[in-house]
């Protein structure tokens, strides 16, 4: 019983973390549409402010974004990141 509850909790946390990573990545894309590359500092400040207002640290948001795996190439690499993340819970 305990193992199943823990597994469910880990899955919920993992799904939520992935969704946060997706939202952070989407925020970056939306900012890119509205601010030119010349305004990279302003984009970064706005993104960091939005992340802080959401109650996250910048590092946590970056980790969640990495978990989503836009840059993580293969399915095995994404699975390994997810497993590593889950073990840290």
Image: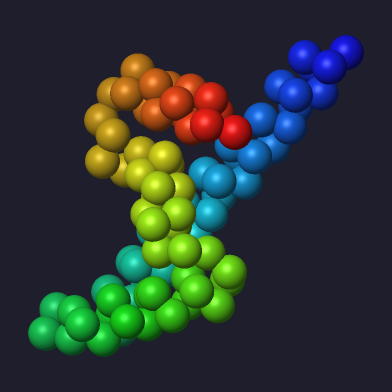
Q: Is residue 45 left or right of residue 36?
A: right
Placement of the C terminus among the 4 image quadrants: top right
Which residue sits at x=25%, y=30%? Answer: 73
Position in image of residue 58 (x %, y %):
40, 64
Single out the residue that lies furthest toward the front: 88
Single out the residue that lies furthest toward the right: 1
Q: Is residue 42 left or right of residue 5?
A: left
Position in image of residue 60 (x %, y %):
45, 54
Q: Is residue 39 left or right of residue 44?
A: left
Which residue sits at x=26%, y=86%? Answer: 42
Q: Is residue 22 visible?
A: no
**Nearer to me, 1 or 33:** 1
Which residue sits at x=53%, y=54%? Answer: 20
Placement of 27 over or under 35, stated as above or below:
above
Position in image of residue 16 (x %, y %):
62, 46
Q: Quadrant of residue 68?
A: top left
Q: Is residue 32 visible?
A: yes
Which residue sits at x=40%, y=48%? Answer: 63
Placement of the N terminus among the 4 image quadrants: top right
Position in image of residue 34 (x %, y %):
30, 83
Q: How is the image coloured?
A: rainbow
């Amino acid at each position: 019983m305990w193992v199943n509850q823990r597994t469910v909790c880990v899955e919920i946390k993992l799904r939520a973390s992935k969704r946060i990573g997706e939202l952070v990545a989407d925020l970056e894309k939306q900012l890119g549409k509205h601010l030119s590359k010349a305004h990279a500092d302003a984009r970064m400040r706005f993104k960091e402010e939005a992340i802080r207002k959401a109650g996250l640290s910048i590092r946590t948001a970056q980790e969640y974004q990495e978990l989503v795996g836009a840059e993580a190439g293969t399915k095995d690499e994404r699975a390994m990141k997810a497993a590593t993340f889950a073990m840290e819970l």
